[in-house]
Image (cartoon, grey):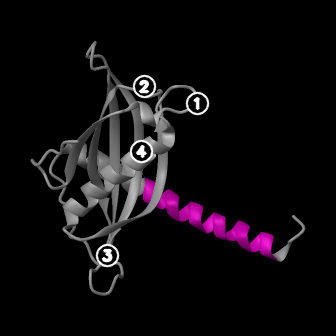
Amino acid sequence: MTTDNTDRRSVIMTKVMPPTFANFSGHVHGGHLMQFLDYVSYVCATRYCGLPTVTVSVDSITFQQPVYIGELITCYASVNYVGRTSMEIGIRTEAENLVSGKKRHVISCYFTFVAIDEKTKRPTAVKPLTINNAVEERRYEAAKLRRELRGEYAKRHQEIKIKNQNNPQS
């Protein structure tokens, strides 16, 4: 694994997919990829805020193509949005055939992390995100929309939960 130290708001990490990661189809098991993506997003979030962080949610992991055993995956992670205590980390993952050099976009995902105060073990404030260019602005605005959707989803989920509690036969 490698990391890119040029910017504390982003990280690039790579890993070769070993045979022990194979699923029953002979491709890389999605669970191994999800674990690595969580690790990459943890590094990105913690590096940005300089505090311990924990995963709060995964908005989506879109497996666009299978990842094959022996391929090198490269994860490009960045902090897209910062709230008071939370950060959205976006990751674009590419797989590279090391023999042919052919690269493919295989996964896109978004993780939300919260910074934790080391003494109190409670969520703590994170420094605001500074937008430096049009790409960062686009990512920030898209992340704001995803945050709104998460709030709507949580509200609807709570409504369903209450409805089911009031009607245990359903």
Query: In terms of sequence position, does the residue under pointer 4 or pointer 1 come before the other?
Result: 1
Q: Position of residue 80 (x, y in %)?
A: 30, 53
* Residue 148 belongs to magenta span: yes
Residue 36 vertical placement versus 66 (above, below): below
Q: Quadrant of the N terminus?
A: top left
Q: Position of residue 151 (x, y in %)?
A: 52, 65
Residue at 34%, 48% in the rendered image? 90
Dot 1 crowding, Cα within 10 Å, few <14, some 14–19, many 20+? few
Dot 4 crowding, Cα within 10 Å, few <14, some 14–19, many 20+? many
Query: In terms of sequence position, does the residue under pointer 2 or pointer 4 come before the other?
Result: 2
Query: In terms of sequence position, does the residue under pointer 1 or pointer 3 come before the other?
Result: 1
Residue 109: mark in rendering: 4
Residue position for label 1: 24
Contact check, label 2 and label 3, Cβ < 8 Å: no
Residue position for label 3: 116
Which stretch appears magenta? 146-165
Residue position for label 2: 68
